[in-house]
Image: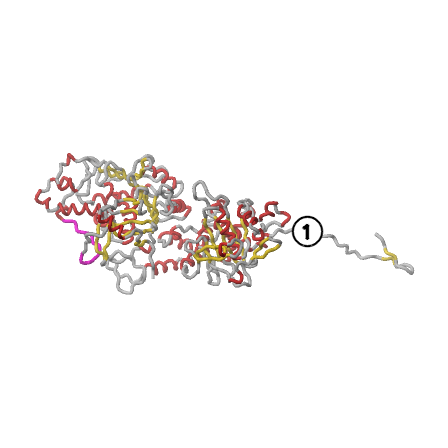
Amino acid sequence: MYEQNLFKVVEPIKKTTISRLNKGKKWKYGYNKEQDLVVISRTGQIGDIYEIQNFKIALPKTTDVYSNKEKKWKQFEYPKELSRLKSIFDWKNYPEEKKAQWHDYIDEEFKRRDDGFWFNNNGKDTYITGTHYMYLQWSKIDVGAPDFREANRLFFIFWEACKADKRCYGMCYLKNRRSGFSFMSSAETVNQATISTDARFGVLSKTGADAKKMFTDKIVPISINYPFFFSPIQDGMDRPKSELAYRVPASKFTRKKITTNEKLEEIQGLDTTIDWKNTGDNSYDGEKLQLLVHDESGKWERPDNILNNWRVTKTCLRLGSRIIGKCMMGSTSNSLDKGGENFKKLYNSSDVTKRNRNGQTASGLYSLFIPMEWNYEGFIDEHGVPVFDNPNHDVFDPHGELIDVGVIENWQNEADGLKGDQDALNEFYRQFPRTTEHAFRDETKNSIFNLVKIYEQIDYNEEMSRTLGITQGNFQWVNGIKDSQVIFYPDKKGRFKVSWVPPSNIQNKVVIKNGVKHPGNVHMGAFGCDSYDISGTVDGVGSKGALHGLTKFSMEDAPANQFFLEYLARPQTAEMFFEDVLMALVFYGMPILAENNKPRLLYYLRRRGYRGFSMNRPDKIWNKLSVAEKEVGGIPNSSEDIKQAHAAAIEMYIQDHVGLSTDGIYGSCYFNELLNDWAKFDINKRTKHDASISSGLAIMANNRHLYAPNARVEKPKLNISIARYANKGNTSKLIKK
């Protein structure tokens, strides 16, 4: 059975606190610092609290739930009498006695637009935001009226929270193909523009032609199909090509103005515009925007750069430190060298769990990823709910078609059919991703390593994730006594991931020689490490310390040629990292090959009496080592020969032990972070790939014989000449040379 993890209902606040504040209607729309959540209720009362990808959002309290006989969303019919009215001028000339009967109807539509809407969906009270209501009820798309989808409901709730949060510049939405983002963002553009005064709204896409098409084919039709009471008077053409202008005598209509029949000439104009720009780094530079729609952001190809553009357009959304506008950004991802890499950086820098002291993410945006199974055409039932698993009863889609298979099985069948063509499979993953890793899959030609094998292994690991036996945890000294024995204890927040723990009889196997401690299981495997020397960095980020353990073939009770340990972390101090490494070495009783250009770890091991655990560089004999190398061991990373040997070691391991073998057996490298780092490894930018550095060193350590120098030994010449004698006379005499 599929278990969704897109969102959950949480209870971070005591119910008594919620009830007390609800009674006084004390909950204010926006970010609540005390409770660390965003309130999207405008009624002063809250109900359920959703957590969508670590972002806590308080919904309004349930009230006035609408229910029809079908118990599902159904677009309300627009009264024919009102549909004949095309503008406020028609309403002005409408008989007063007829106006009166529509005041309540119009007032209710404004209320739903502001506060959102509750309806009964298959017996469940369901809330949609005002923006979502405007999309479903009043937005015309290519198929007519949009369907209600649970995925879109969560999308609009997340978006409403982005708007409400004063710390946020908007959203960065990683999506699957045909998820409806272009229409939803177009609907929001029109919705906001028709209630905003003296404002500007902009549209960008992967090309100027795409932005123009979105404007003419989506935004303009939605605008001209609004009912008269939502539609300001438009200046210019009915179907403009470049700018939609709500100018004088256009007006921001309110319930009060409509119901009191206020004279038009007394109403001030909106002076609001919607336009599009050609794609470029400086698009909208210097403009003040209330909303920027950024479509297909993951497909900006050189020379256009989405990162550069965002640095520019971000300033269009603020005055000083005050955020006055929002960005609605969404896209699938191209391959990494065709815009995907920059979009990936932008998405990763929008993680709501990683904020600066101002409470903002690095990009200012909030990232949202909705897996494809939530929004895949043909696998959404009549209530808008995804059909994840194969149904055990008749289930129908909104058009009455029977759904007899779940989306998970259907997706897997399609993926299985493409496994003979890795690039086609990667494109399928990017278009219909179930994970962020799928979304950012690269083309096989863009890696120096065998991406086919790497992705085969990643897919296998994801499929078998529950049975691989990966345990997260930490090491510690027994009873806190250093240099005694080490134990491993599971911890979901631990810094280590391990796939194999040695039997107790070979744990903590340390041999002391001449007062120096040496590993007792050197025949079983080794560690590789990419260390760091400085505890803190200027930006507070810095590279991570990386440690990988790898077994080799042995007669012991251990898996052969398997990465059994992964550590990718940056503790508060470098010493904490050093101690973590030391405890892992002692527990497994294996040596370590580390880079010596950052030598503090190696000096730390020597000072603690563990110099014997630090391997010397395998490409030089002892008397050719430098003084420092003899003192602490390690291997430099500056040499071009070492760089090439390191990359070749990884390449060899991938070829032999990763992915599907000719015997039909998958490899045993179960750490997907490592595999993904290999996939994007750049030999010219090695500092970005901590996992690749440490894992490559582990491979080199286990195969040190391959790197041993061919030492020239001067051998003494042997005299193999035969003594010769003169045999004349009675006595033989030696013939001297």
Q: Is residue 451 left or right of residue 232?
A: right
Check disc 1 and report the residue beneath it: 713
Q: Inspect this view and state whether residue 186 appears.
A: yes
Q: Inspect this view and state whether residue 210 appears.
A: no
Q: Is residue 666 left or right of residue 376?
A: right
Q: Residue 621 at x, y = what percent?
A: 62, 50
Q: Nearer the viewer, residue 474 or 450?
A: 474
**Secondary element at tag 1:** loop
Quarter in which the N terminus is drawn: bottom left
* Residue extending furthest toward the right: 729
Q: How is the image coloured?
A: secondary structure
Q: Which residue is drawn at 12% across and 39% down?
A: 261
Three-letter code for the amino acid on which mark 1 is drawn: Val
The region drawn magenta spans 68-79
Q: Residue 195 at x, y = what percent?
A: 22, 41
Instruction: Give the quarter of the image for residue 310.
Output: top left
Image height of 44 relative to 121, above or below: above
- Magenta stretch: includes residue 607: no
Image height of 304 relative to 10, above or below: above
Q: Residue at x 22, y 45 (%)?
A: 114
* Residue extending furthest toward the bottom: 392
Q: Residue 570 at x, y = what percent?
A: 46, 48
- Magenta stretch: includes residue 78: yes
Instruction: Give the quarter of the image for residue 494.
Output: bottom left
